[in-house]
Image (cartoon, coloured by chain):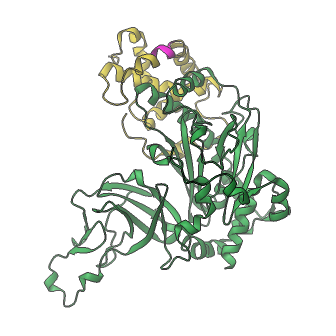
Amino acid sequence: MTHPTLPAPFADLAPFAAQWARPSENARSEIRWSASKDDFKALYDAMMPRLDDILALLSQHPATGMPEDVHNLFLLACAFAEASPHHELYGGSSAVPYSFDARRFVRTDGDAAL
Amino acid sequence: MMTTGITAEDLAHISRSSEDIRRELGVDPVSVRAISDPAIYDLEREKIFKKTWLKVATTWELPNVGDYKVKELPVADASVLIFRGKDGNIRAFHNVCTHRGNKVVPTTGFETFGRSRANVVTCRFHGWVFSTDGPLRSVPMKERFGKLDTACLGLREIHCDIWEGFVFINFDAEPAQSLTDYLGDFGKLFGGYPYAESTTAFRYSTVLNCNWKVAHYAFSEGYHVPTIHAGSLPGFQGVDHRDFKLMGPHASSTIYGAGMDTAPSTLAFASMLSNTERHRPRPDQLPPAINPERRADFQFELPNLFPNFIIHLASGCGYPGMSFFTHQFWPLDHGRTLWEGINYFRPAQTAAEQVAQQHVNALHRNAWLEDTATMEDTFTGIMSGTIDEMQLMDQEFLIRHAARTLDSFLAA
């Protein structure tokens, strides 16, 4: 399987990009809802130590019109941004504890690709 | 900063202490009949939703001439077409062809957005063409009608006015009050904040199997925060809910907070946002009578704009980078409600800011998932007939006030 290309300093994160990076919130939610506690931990352990460096690189690019490798990193960072609370706060659960069914909760404009 | 010239002193008369609230609104339990009785819902449709001003759009959703939004409002048996016309003005019409009643603009779901580049819309049934400012422009085979007064067959207009970029409509043929008069002190309290700069919107909706007031009331108090949000707000050190205000049918209050344990990823995203001029906390931009002492622990203002709209004004002080967020509760029938929640940010300039906004939005969306978890159970409980009354504490005064306001509208 070919992995998305990432900027050179982050090339080793390509398997995570293949697993998590998707262009819309609704598509990323589907991935998150099926993730296991170990999936969240592996993503967190790979991303959190590099987060400041990733944000520093993404700060050099406007919100639209990124080169493809930067865009792939951006989508991985978006997936991490949405997944990190599941590791930090929700005990690795793919659902928010004691919550409404997230599948009934529609991001009305969430299919707009980033 | 924009200013309305209103000072905190000008609005001193809306301010209430807990003692004032108890004296003015009472301390007795409040009947749940307005929630449980389907006959009340029929009265609400006629005496509230077809009489009061209702927020249906924002000006920044319709930035260009020809932009439109269609909003389906079953509570008023209406499909509403909101257009920015050729003259730049926003108008609202019934989305109904004056020929035989078909929908002029076809819709999907409760909200449909689009743009008419030629400044006309054409009914797909027989091709009647209307201008975006209303008049009937052309009718195919017009000469085959024995009688047709096209001058009187424009789209049927609905009263529409704008406050601070929020577009309101009123279904009444002759509204009893202008929008400015209806908003009254609410418009002064919340006026002057640059709402229209926060054009980045994360929009959510869900259909809840509960009466609309169950959903509305669940978002109308801070009493629930330490318990229901224990998961999403860990180490939460409590809220200080105060600065109560009463303004005719509307009311407001302020949530100050002692903070919470911030998770490492949230800290990284929040730090990045707070280092930017566009997304940092801006207590200085709050209208003068909101957080008048400019307390550093201000989180957001929690109001009720009667009947069904909440603007939580945060100015970046609560959730990092969040300018404000809104809730709206649209009855679909007595026991079904369309809830709409929108998080508003200033546009991200960099890809990193956009990622950080995704994180903050996700945290807040997840808190909403905790909020909505109670609503269907609450309605089921009330419909079981087990309780006749709600017990309300001081910080649930927005509910007490809204219930009284509802009663007064239904009695009118």
At x 70%, y 25%, the residue is: B261
Any part of residue B246 in sight: yes
At x 39%, y 73%, the residue is: B157
Q: Is residue B301 above or below residue B43?
A: above
In front of the other: B11 or B122: B11
At x 47%, y 30%, the residue is: A31
In front of the other: A62 or B234: A62
Q: Is residue A52 magenta?
A: yes
Q: Is residue A111 magenta?
A: no
Q: Tell me the quarter of the image containing the C terminus of chain A.
A: top left
How far across and down, in percent of the image, does residue A25 sit?
Answer: 45, 36
Residue B153: which quarter of the image?
Answer: bottom left
Image position of B194 (left or right of A5): right
Q: Is residue A83 above or below residue B219?
A: above
What predominant SS class does the magenta segment belong to? helix
How far across and down, in percent of the image, does residue B210 sit?
Answer: 63, 58
State the hue of chain A.
yellow
How far across and down, in percent of the image, does residue B244 sit?
Answer: 74, 53
In front of the other: B281 or B231: B281
Q: What residue span does the magenta drawing correspond to?
A: A50-54
In front of the other: B255 or B385: B255
How far across and down, in percent of the image, does residue B329 sit?
Answer: 58, 58
Q: Tell me the quarter of the image containing the N terminus of chain A.
A: top left
Q: Which chain is green?
A: B
Any part of residue B26 in sight: no
Q: Is residue B201 above or below residue B334?
A: above
Image position of B28 (left or right of B178): right
